Image (cartoon, rainbow, N blue to C red):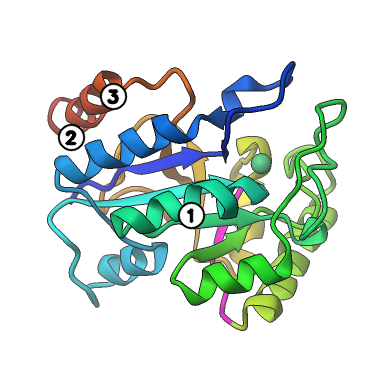
Amino acid sequence: MRLPILMYHAVDRGPQGARSPRLYVPPEQFEAQLATLQQLGYETISFGDWLAFRRGRATLPRRPIILTFDDGYRSIGEIAWPILRRFGFGATVFLVSDLIGKTNAWDPPAPPEPLLGAAEIAEMQAAGICFESHTRTHAALTMIPPERALEELTTSRAVLSQLLNAPVTVLCYPYGKQNLMVRALAREAGYEAAVIARRRMNTARTDPFRLTRIWIDNRMTLARLRWTLFRLRWLHFA
Ligand SMILES: [Zn+2]
């Protein structure tokens, strides 16, 4: 079984002069990408489905895929979600627990981007969108003392579990920064899996605290998306 996980940030046109244009995928490009995934036979699953499968407690569709969105931008609710629904696709959104309903304060001097609020999260959750942790303040976990990193991990997990009234078991390392210590802290804090950015498919042998994701940005053409998925599925056996 080979599982691709795609990594998105904002689905939007992006403000003029945005510091990080790579964080934005325009809506029509996103829609065309979902159409391509559907044509290729992909069906979305959740991290819970994948973890249950790894424990031998669930079966998966023939071509499973997980769609993820980092940071919880409000555009995910306003723009990406209606498109996802049209295709019957689910997704997982990684939230920064201190900044629900605020802006991406960790990213100055970029123009502030609004983040999803509690009401929007509840509405999306009721419709099957999954929410997991992107820590409490979006701190780079390898750059702060271990006890602070552990606090980021445990507090965000507790706050989000309460907000969602559901267990939070998956972590997205801010800036993708992780090491042996951070992975151990994540396990200690009660997470069951965590994601990084690396262009690979996941297999039963992949470290659950280093599940790999394919970064999708506005340079990902449909031809490149098809080729990337084909190549990783059939030609890469690392
Ligand atoms: Zn982030």
Q: Is residue 224 left or right of residue 133?
A: left
Q: Is residue 54 left or right of residue 211?
A: left
Cα–Cα gap, marks 2 and 3: 17 Å
Q: Which residues are magenta?
A: 166-172
Q: Of helix, strand and loop, which one carries label 3?
A: helix
Please state the horizontal and vertical placement of residue 13, each as a whole percent of the image. 58, 28
Circle 3 packing at 10 Å, graded few (<14), some (14-19), many (20+), is: some
Instruction: Of the two numbered discs 1 and 3 on the same chain, state the one appearing first in sequence.
Output: 1
Q: Is residue 36 left or right of residue 193?
A: left
Amino acid type of the residue tagged 3 in the rendering:
Leu
Cα–Cα gap, marks 1 and 3: 20 Å
Which residue in the protein does label 1 denote?
A: 81
Front position among marks 1 and 2: 1
Which residue in the protein does label 3 denote?
A: 222
Please state the horizontal and vertical placement of residue 81, each as a whole percent of the image. 48, 54
Q: Residue at x 73, y 51 (%)?
A: 115
Instruction: Of the two numbered discs 1 and 2 on the same chain, state the one appearing first in sequence.
Output: 1
Which residue in the protein does label 2 denote?
A: 233
Q: Is residue 231 above or below residue 106?
A: above
